[in-house]
Image (cartoon, rainbow, N blue to C red):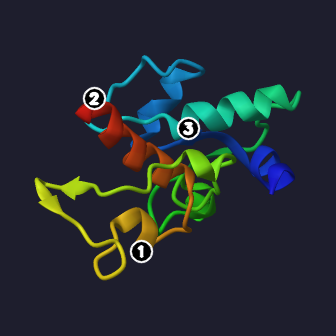
């Protein structure tokens, strides 16, 4: 996977091609939706002593994109016990995750990076 990524693509983006301008900064957010996964991928590539040398950008969010496998809902979170599993609300209403799971569970894997982000940001907002 890693060799495929660095040899075929020049960079990655999450919400728009302009995301590449963020480079390694989570503070650069030029689109309405936050993009942090692309920054994390760039940092991981660099930490492995490599960089991209391909010719095209890779989108890592859309289900129709070549990089969908790298979407945060498809990547297991390394500390799944830290994912909040208690009752959460969606648009002010209680949600039964078994009968009506959110998009990151329907489209991805359980205990993903996206699940950690979505579940734990709710907890942070409450407190």
Q: For the residue labelled by badge 3, is the local secondary structure a helix, a strand or a loop?
A: helix
Quarter that holds the C terminus: top left
The answer to which quarter of the image holds residue 82 is top right
Q: Estimate how packed mark 3 is, as few (under 14), some (14 to 19) or many (20 or more) residues with alpha carbons within 10 Å.
A: many
User: Residue at horizontal 33%, vertical 66%?
Assistant: 102
Q: For the residue labelled by badge 2, is the local secondary structure a helix, a strand or a loop?
A: loop
Q: Estimate how packed mark 2 is, as few (under 14), some (14 to 19) or many (20 or more) residues with alpha carbons within 10 Å.
A: few
Residue 106: mark: 1
Q: Nearer the viewer, residue 28 or 86?
A: 86
Q: For the residues marked 3 and 1, what is the alpha-carbon distance in whole angstroms?
A: 22 Å
Q: For the residue labelled by badge 1, is the local secondary structure a helix, a strand or a loop?
A: helix
Task: Check the image and report above or below for 107 versus 14.
Answer: below
| Position in image of residue 25 (x %, y %) | 53, 18
First of labels 3, 1 by sequence position: 3
First of labels 1, 2 by sequence position: 1
Check disc 2 and report the residue beneath it.
127
Check disc 3 and report the residue beneath it.
38
| Position in image of residue 72 (x %, y %) | 54, 52
User: Residue at horizontal 27%, vertical 72%?
Assistant: 96
| Position in image of residue 34 (x %, y %) | 36, 35
């Amino acid at each position: 996977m890693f060799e495929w990524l660095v040899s075929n693509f020049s960079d990655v983006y999450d919400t728009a091609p302009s995301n590449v301008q963020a480079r390694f900064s989570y503070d650069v957010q030029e689109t309405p939706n936050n993009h942090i996964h692309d920054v994390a991928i760039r940092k991981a590539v660099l930490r492995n002593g490599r960089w991209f040398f391909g010719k095209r950008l890779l989108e890592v969010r859309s289900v129709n994109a070549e990089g969908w496998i790298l979407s945060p809902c498809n990547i297991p979170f390394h500390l799944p016990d830290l994912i909040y599993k208690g009752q959460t609300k969606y648009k002010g209403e209680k949600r039964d995750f078994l009968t009506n799971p959110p998009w990151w569970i329907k489209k991805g894997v359980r205990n993903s990076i996206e699940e950690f982000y979505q579940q734990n940001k709710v907890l942070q907002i409450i407190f």
